[in-house]
Amino acid sequence: MPKLLALAGGAALAGCQWLVWCYAPEEATLGLMQKIFYVHLPLAWWALISFFVVFLGSLAVLARRSEAADRLCAAAAEVGVLFSGLTLLTGMIWARRSWGVWWTWDPRLSTALVMWFIYAAYLLLRGLDMAPERRRTVCAVVGVAAFLDVPLVFVSARIWRSIHPAVFASRGGGLEPEMKLTAVACVAAMGLFWAALVWLRKRQLDLAARLEAADADED
Amino acid sequence: MLRLSLAIARKDLVLTLVRGNGLVQALLLGLLLLFVFSLAQAPGEKVGPQAAAAMFWLASAFSQVLIFNRLYDVEEANGARLGLALLPAPVQGVWLGKLAAGLVLLLLAQAVFLPAALVFLGQDLVAHPFTGLAILALVDAGMCALGSLLGALAQGQSGRESLLGVVLFPLLTPLLLAGIGVGAQCLGAPAPDGPAAWLRLAAAFDAVFLGVGLVLFGFIYPGED
């Protein structure tokens, strides 16, 4: 199943290249550089979804002491940190072209960076030398607290005022229909790829847990 | 539960204030940070209100890490933590007691940091004294709610100061932004929209993390070695 998902995700991402380069119109001001948006946006969305999965998995760990849910949290957090790191990198390239600087303390950028910090700290916690059950509980508590913090970070960013473009603005602005369709297709394709990554990583962690259990039985 | 919280808060305050070193360490770190930040300005140059407010809250945040590490360290000797965990009372009482003790210690530290920030960074409190007090209370309550929860997380870990800082600071970002936003206004920064939005955000943060602390502390407070 993960291989199928990875293949489907790869094929869909390749297909999206046609939409990106041939179907979606070139943006008048930014030119070709705007095309990075079709990578940036899906990465950002799936990073956020990864963190939501960590939240749900953490609730399952706390409610049912589920080891499988803990491993799902680990896999989703790793992919989420990777995707949010790539979101920041692609955003910086965009910022250089659009705003003339590699980095600006725009609140939404800062929010993305804060989320990266939070979940990088979460991964750090997972690597600590603790009793497995305590580590599961501690990470689950941080997983819940971290996700509940995300909306507050977004609201604080909005109050601080943003120069970040509104992508799917409800009134006026936003994207041309062709651009919107391409963006949605890219998000869907990246979703398949994301699911494959999380699934594969979770399976690796499942196998590692089985090996550890077998070693413990032999001892 | 409230009786347990009050007893724990009183015990922690007595132990910390009588021995002194827990609070003194936090005070010195905060003052040192303010002094070092003040070196960022050229001689005769004035730090902007927003930068000054940021420095004040950073000093408070670093002190808070030391305060909560100290508060949770108190029970590490002689198995006292197990005694607390076995008490016939909700374990959330421990969280609330530590929160209350931490809040008092943080306010004491800030009573020193505020005049120090005004002096070192050349600031004047120009307006909004009640707003300033309100944001101080709201931000401190949120910081201590989260600090008390995550302080238990770092308990017993090696390098717990850095661990607590790494986990705590990013989570505190919205609250620190609120503190800095309103603090800057109190120091004279122009604010067309006023402090209401920041006050609401800080209150929302407090509500969320007071609830989170109350619900999740039971999972995190270790009842074993």
Image: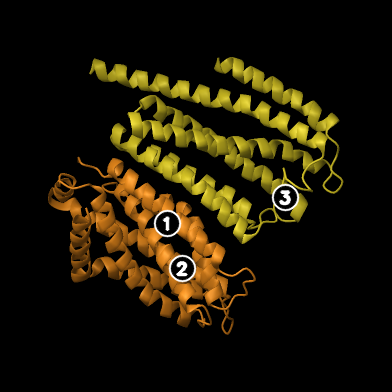
At label 1, the amino acid type is Asp
Instruction: Tell me which chain appears yellow.
Output: A
At label 2, the amino acid type is Ile
Residue that label 1 marks: B206
Neighbor class of circle 3 (other Cα within 10 Å; few <14, some 14-19, many 20+) is few
Residue B114 figure quarter: bottom left
The answer for how far apart the CA atoms under marks 2 and 3 are is: 31 Å
Please indicate whether residue A214 sits to the left or right of residue A76 in the image. left
The answer for how far apart the CA atoms under marks 1 and 2 are is: 11 Å
Indicate the position of residue B1 as horizontal and vertical percent values. Answer: 21, 53
Instruction: Tell me which chain appears orange.
Output: B
Secondary structure beneath dot 2 equals helix
Q: Dots 2 and 3: beta carbons under 8 Å?
A: no
Q: Visible in this render: residue A127?
A: no
Q: Visible in this render: residue A172?
A: yes
Q: Quadrant of the N terminus of chain A?
A: top right
At label 3, the amino acid type is Pro
Residue that label 2 marks: B135
Q: Nearer the viewer, residue A113 or A191?
A: A191
Neighbor class of circle 2 (other Cα within 10 Å; few <14, some 14-19, many 20+) is many
Residue that label 3 marks: A165
**Label disc, if present, on residue A144 of the rendered structure:** none
Circle 1 chain: B
Q: Are marks 2 and 3 on the same chain?
A: no
